[in-house]
């Protein structure tokens, strides 16, 4: 920050802005201009405490002690502001006098920010001052002060560490780990000299594993008695051998506490696994080390991992057994030949040179494994051993070579008289690929026609036309075996090159099994594949079909045009186009099912293609194609075709569309002059009512010819009949009835007022209300049947609405409705009507309630004064008692239920 204004002669001049005065003070403090600071402080407007006392912080940072002394006397300056930055910066940057001056001020806290002053201090003089101050803690943050002291490589860091170690609060145990990792030998030496030091557990192991140790540090640690070299079964020594720390291994071997054979000579085995040859040589010179430990694991692992130098070293040791663990070394070597052939070949040669190694172990497993690879040298080396039998396990060696297509190995094996390529009825030629089959077929013992030409039949399903050509060139092969099965398989697999090859052979009959080959081209694997694969299969199928259709012997219409039917079901336009190029193929097969499929999929191009054929009838199967159409354009195409007659079969197309609720099709047909929307006594609108199609009903009511009252107003009767309060279509039926009631021709009283009777039975209060608003509706029809239906089906709200109509009489048939009431809710509504007498027919309502064990209904009836109090002999009383319903026990009537029950109990 530069000085904004030059100094003026009069510091109190009002022309000097206040902001510039404070800036000048800060700048002068930073630059160490003591006299200038004094002059600026005489300005009454000056505030050296501005910006959180930035002036003293700037002076402390630069080590201007006198300026700091001057500022400390100013009342506006706070030296502890900004978390005691002034003292922290002075200590960190090594300003001794400045730090001493600031620490003498009681406002300053040198332990601020978790003792950052002492943590960042790099001068011994300042460190002494801080350590003397009781507020400072050098052990803060897990002794981070001593841990960080050597990180900066400051020339005086050793003095700092000595000062810290002299403080009893400091523990150097954590610092010794960091110092050793970074190679600070002198620091480690200083720390280890502290008797309080506790060497962390597994410290040496960590150094070895992270490769951070050095010989000097290892020597210091090993000479320290606090380090237990034999801890954890000599883990330090074992790690040193595994990580190839040669110098450390030498040091450890010279220590009598170390046991190099610990854990069954694990150190030696780890060194062998890690290919540490120098360490291995050191260990082999130790008498207590056994290189054959753990069943000669070292040599087995060396053979498994192709560690040639380790293996050579171990094989020279007298007591090492190369055949240990059932010759595992040679078996593992042959099993992994494919990974690194040259190295494993050398390992194999070294193992076979040892007389104790048996290459025929485990039923000749070594040569069986070697035959899986393409290492001819290894197989040849094994075959040169007298013990090896390449025919073991029923010719498994040759089987492995054939399965892995190792032709050179196969040729080598076939030169051995013990190997039989015709084993198991010529199993190998039947499973071989082209390269292997060429090797096998050249052997006189091999019969490629075995098992009725199975090898040829399998080849026709493969992706190798060269293999098929190889077999066709052999006179022993019969390509017509199993009724031309090979040809049929090739067609079903859509192998264009193979089909082309087979058709050139005059022996092939493409019409075998009713032209099954032609049919299988289309009938397999189209529906189970994804779109990309399906397209690829379709292209292959097209090529095969063209080849077959070019042959005059092929019948494209076999099995009732099965090929075309399968193609239309799959919807592959290219295949259908190829098939239709044959005049014998009938696209109208199965009553024009192909057109229906294309229409349902929305395939406009395919629909046009099929309509171009005169044999196709778009109105077949009651216009199935139009009804199945998923696109408006397809419906238009089909209806525009002259062969399509929407009025056919008494306008069955329009009627079916209304029954299914196909709005778009109905709109399209409504504009067609050939369509009669009122056909079959207006069946369309009646079907719409049955299927709850509100939009269809709205469309039909807009057609003048449609009569909504047809067949004795069946439309409104069906809506009311199908309406129930639990129906998901309740709102739809209410709207439909409202629309029908708005039609002058509709009579809601038709068929003895059936609509309101059905609505009452269904329980729709809203619908009943709509019907009752029509003066033609008589709710009392058929001796109050509407109310009877509402009561019988337990619809209290409907009952209440009907009772508001004066024509409805709830007392009809000697109060039939209260007598047959199924619930208390309905009975409560009925009893609210003064015409209803609940005591009619000698209290039959009460007796029926007793018989049904309806406690709520009994309680309601007994609360009515007109209901006679029952006696114990009253009919139905026993049922009420069984229902756990009790009358008032305070009654004075000696013949009451309570009194009778008490008397009965006393007698009992």
Image (cartoon, helix red, strand yellow):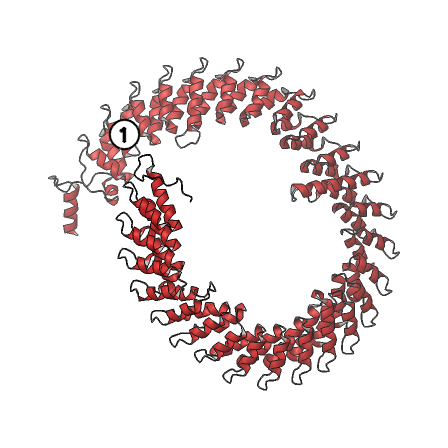
Q: Is residue 291 visible?
A: no
Left or right of 721 in this view: 255: right
| Residue tagged 1 | 818
The quadrant the N terminus occupies is top left
Q: Nearer the viewer, residue 885 or 531?
A: 531
For residue 135, above or below residue 626:
below
Residue 806, how many percent across, how many down?
29, 18
Residue 833, how many percent across, how many down?
24, 24
For residue 271, above or below residue 123:
below
Which residue lies at the image location 37% right of the left edge and 17% below the top edge? 777
For residue 260, above or below residue 40:
below
**Mark 1 element type:** helix
Q: Nearer the viewer, residue 801 or 243?
A: 243
Residue at the left extreme of this rendering: 892
Q: Nearer the viewer, residue 346 or 89?
A: 89
Which residue lies at the image location 81% right of the left edge and 46% below the top edge? 497
Residue 437, how many percent across, how many down?
81, 59
Q: Is residue 593 visible?
A: yes
**Are there few (<14), some (14-19), or many (20+) residues within 10 Å of tag 1?**
many
Residue 252, how many percent across, how many down?
53, 80
Q: How many marks?
A: 1
């Amino acid at each position: 920050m530069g000085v904004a204004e030059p100094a003026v002669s009069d510091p109190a001049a009002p022309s000097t802005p206040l902001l510039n005065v404070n800036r000048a003070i800060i700048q002068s403090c930073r630059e160490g201009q003591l006299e200038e600071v004094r002059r600026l402080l005489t300005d009454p407007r000056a505030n050296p405490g501005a910006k959180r006392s930035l002036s003293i912080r700037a002076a402390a940072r630069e080590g201007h002690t006198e300026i700091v002394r001057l500022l400390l006397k100013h009342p506006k300056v706070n030296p502890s502001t900004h978390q005691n930055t002034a003292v922290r910066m002075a200590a960190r940057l090594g300003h001794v006098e400045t730090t001493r001056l600031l620490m003498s001020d009681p406002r300053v806290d040198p332990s601020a920010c978790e003792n950052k002053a002492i943590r960042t201090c790099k001068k011994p003089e300042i460190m002494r001052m801080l350590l003397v101050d009781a507020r400072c803690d050098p052990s803060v943050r897990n002794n981070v002060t001593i841990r960080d002291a050597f990180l900066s490589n400051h020339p005086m860091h050793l003095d700092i560490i000595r000062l810290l170690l002299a403080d009893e609060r400091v523990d150097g145990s954590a610092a010794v780990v960091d110092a050793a990792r970074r190679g600070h030998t002198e620091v480690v030496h200083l720390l280890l000299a502290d008797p309080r030091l506790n060497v962390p557990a597994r410290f040496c192991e960590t150094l070895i594993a992270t490769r951070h140790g050095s010989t000097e540090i290892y020597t210091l640690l090993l000479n320290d008695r606090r380090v237990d070299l034999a801890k954890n079964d000599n883990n330090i020594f074992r790690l040193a051998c595994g990580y190839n720390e040669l110098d450390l291994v030498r040091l450890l071997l010279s220590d009598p506490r170390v046991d190099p054979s610990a854990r069954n000579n694990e150190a030696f085995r780890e060194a062998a696994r890690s290919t540490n040859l120098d360490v291995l040589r050191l260990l082999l010179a130790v008498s207590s080390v056994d290189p054959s430990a753990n069943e000669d694991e070292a040599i087995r692992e060396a053979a498994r991992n192709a560690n040639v130098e380790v293996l050579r070293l171990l094989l020279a040791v007298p007591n090492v057994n190369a055949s240990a663990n059932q010759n595992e070394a040679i078996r593992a070597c042959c099993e992994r030949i494919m990974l690194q052939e040259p190295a494993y070949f050398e390992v194999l040669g070294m193992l076979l040179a040892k007389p104790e190694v048996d290459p025929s172990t485990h039923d000749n497993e070594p040569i069986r494994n070697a035959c899986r690879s393409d290492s001819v040298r290894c197989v040849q080396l094994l075959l040169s051993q007298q013990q090896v039998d390449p025919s073991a396990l029923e010719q498994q060696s040759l089987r492995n070579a054939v399965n892995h297509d190792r032709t050179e190995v196969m040729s080598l094996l076939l030169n051995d008289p013990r190997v039989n390529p015709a084993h198991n009825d010529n199993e190998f030629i039947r499973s071989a690929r082209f390269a292997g089959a060429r090797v096998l077929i050249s052997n006189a013992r091999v019969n490629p026609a075995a098992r009725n030409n199975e090898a040829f039949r399998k080849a026709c399903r493969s992706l190798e036309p060269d293999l098929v050509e190889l077999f066709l060139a052999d006179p022993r092969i019969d390509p017509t075996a199993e009724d031309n099965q090979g040809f049929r398989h090739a067609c079903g697999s859509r192998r264009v090159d193979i089909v082309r090859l087979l058709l050139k052979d005059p022996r092939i009959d493409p019409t075998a099994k009713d032209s099954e080959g032609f049919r299988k081209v289309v009938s397999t694997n189209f529906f189970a594949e994804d779109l990309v694969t399906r397209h690829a299969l379709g292209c292959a199928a097209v090529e095969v079909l063209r080849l077959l259709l070019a042959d005059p012997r092929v019948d494209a219409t076999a099995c009732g045009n099965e090929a075309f039917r399968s193609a239309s079901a799959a919807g592959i336009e290219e295949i259908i186009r190829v098939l239709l190029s044959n005049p014998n193929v009938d696209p109208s097969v199965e009553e024009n099912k192909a057109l229906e499929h294309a229409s349902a999929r929305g395939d406009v191009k395919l629909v046009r293609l099929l309509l171009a054929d005169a044999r196709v009838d778009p109105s077949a199967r009651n216009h199935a194609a139009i009804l199945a159409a998923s696109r408006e354009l397809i419906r238009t195409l089909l209806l525009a075709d002259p062969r399509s007659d929407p009025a056919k079969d008494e306008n069955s197309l329009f009627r079916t569309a209304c029954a299914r609720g196909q709005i778009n099709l109905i709109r399209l047909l409504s504009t067609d002059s050939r369509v009669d929307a009122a056909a079959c006594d207006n069946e369309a609108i009646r079907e719409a009512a049955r299927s709850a199609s509100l939009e269809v009903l709205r469309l039909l009511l807009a057609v003048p010819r449609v009569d909504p009252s047809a067949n004795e107003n069946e439309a409104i009767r069906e809506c009311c009949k199908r309406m129930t309060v639990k129906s998901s279509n309740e709102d739809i039926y209410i709207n439909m009835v409202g629309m029908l009631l708005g039609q002058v021709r509709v009579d809601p009283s038709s068929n003895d007022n059936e609509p309101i009777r059905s609505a009452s039975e269904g329980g729709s209060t809203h619908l009943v209300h709509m019907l009752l608003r029509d003066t033609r509706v008589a709710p009392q029809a058929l001796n109050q049947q509407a109310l009877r239906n509402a009561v019988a089906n337990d619809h209290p709200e409907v009952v209440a609405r009907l009772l508001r109509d004066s024509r409805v009489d709830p007392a009809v048939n000697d109060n039939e409705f209260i007598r047959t009431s199924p619930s208390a809710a309905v009975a409560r509504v009925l009893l609210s009507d003064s015409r209803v007498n609940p005591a009619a027919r000698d209290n039959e309502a009460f007796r029926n309630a007793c018989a049904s064990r309806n406690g709520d209904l009994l309680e309601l009836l007994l609360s009515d004064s007109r209901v006679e109090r029952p006696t114990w002999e009253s009919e139905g009383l026993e049922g009420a008692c069984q229902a756990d319903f009790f009358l008032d026990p305070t009654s004075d009537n000696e013949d009451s239920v309570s009194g009778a029950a008490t008397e009965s109990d006393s007698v009992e």
